[in-house]
Image (cartoon, rainbow, N blue to C red):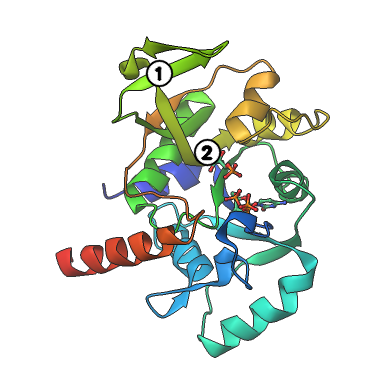
Amino acid sequence: MPGLKSKISNLRSTYAVIVAGGSGSRMQSALPKQFIELCGEPVLMHTIRAFYESRSSPQIILVLHAGYHQMWESLCGKHNFIIPHTIIAGGETRFHSVKNAVDQITGNNVLIAVHDAVRPLVSHDIIDEAYRCAAEHGSAVTAVKSRDSVRQVKDGISAGVDRDSIYLVQTPQTFQSVLLKKAYEQPYCDSFTDDASVVEKSGITIRLIEGSYSNIKITFPEDIAIADSLINKKATIR
Ligand SMILES: Nc1ccn([C@@H]2O[C@H](COP(=O)(O)OP(=O)(O)OP(=O)(O)O)[C@@H](O)[C@H]2O)c(=O)n1
Ligand SMILES: C[C@](O)(CO)[C@H](O)COP(=O)(O)O
């Protein structure tokens, strides 16, 4: 959609907070999964490029555990990776990592997308639609409908659930900065698994936008092969 970038940025500045402060315990690899090579370059570079090349072209804030800052700089040199970004130290949980970045963003008329570094297959269309929707409605949380049947287990007994009412949440999760900053002033709570849960706890109704089944989160070892094949498929379609 030509003109979308200017339409959004005329109204508000756009930021992308790429959270890469995790240790990737479920991946069980020596190197945290955000640094594993996928089609010739670290996962994280694919993710940053997706935002940089989107029409919204946000300012990028990368959240990385302090112990990996130097290694990341060497990787950028090795891969000649020159996309501009600011690096911030990660925190103890995803919540604390996001908070560290959000606390650095000033200005009221700003849109902030929070995105997992380990979702490198996010499309430009999803990124742009999330900024557009958040500009209009305050929030835009990417999600897909469950494709499997769903059952809920209570006291050892399972009961079917209407799967059309079940959405699986992804990132980006994009918000007007006033809402996100206020939400991240709350004390940490174990139920904060994503940004939507933090913002919702602050009293805001969350708006969902359509995600993609290809926008996978690299979590377990087999996900690397899946992501690799999806990236190769995308390259063939182009
Ligand atoms: N303290 C943390 C924990 C997680 N993340 C980021 O949040 C995203 C989603 O988290 P997840 O997939 O759970 O990553 P890890 O915490 O690294 O993995 P695991 O739970 O298997 O240890 C990842 O991009 C991860 O780097 C972060 O920035 N800071
Ligand atoms: C934010 C997230 O990717 C949305 O699906 C997810 O909640 C992260 O969860 P994890 O337990 O840290 O993998």
Vertical side of 120 occupied by 206: above or below: above
Q: Position of residue 89 (x, y in %)?
A: 77, 60
Taking the spot 31% from the left edge, 23% from the top edge, the residue there is 149
Q: Is residue 154 above or below residue 15?
A: above
Identified at 56% across, 60% down, the residue is: 27
Viewer-nearest of discs 1 and 2 = 1
Residue beneath label 2, please?
173
- How far across and how far down the image is residue 22, in percent? 67, 56
Q: Is residue 178 visible?
A: yes
Residue 151 is tagged as 1
Answer few, some or many: residues within 10 Å of disc 1's Cα (few below 14, many 20 plus, some between 14 and 19).
few
Q: Residue at x 72, y 51 (%)?
A: 101
Residue at image point 41% right, 80% down: 40
Mark toward the start of the polypeptide (1 vs 2)? 1
**Closer to us: 9 or 221:** 221
Q: Does label 1 point to a residue whose CB lies under 8 Å from ligand 2?
A: no
Q: Is residue 102 above or below residue 31?
A: above
Residue lying furthest bottom: 78
Indicate if the residue with disc 2 has its beta carbon within 8 Å of ligand 2: yes
Pick the front one: 179 or 218: 218
Numbered badge on residue 105: none
Q: Mark 1 and mark 2: span between their CA atoms?
A: 27 Å
Residue 13, compared with residue 204, is above or below; it is: below
As shown in the figure, which amino acid type bears the numbered disc 2? Gln
Residue 102, image x and y in percent?
Answer: 72, 45
Q: Give the crowd class for mark 2: few <14, some 14-19, many >=20 residues within 10 Å.
A: many
In this view of the protein, which residue sits in the foreground, 58 or 35?
Answer: 35
Residue projecting furthest to the left: 237
Q: Quadrant of residue 200?
A: top right
Residue type of the residue flagged with mark 1: Arg
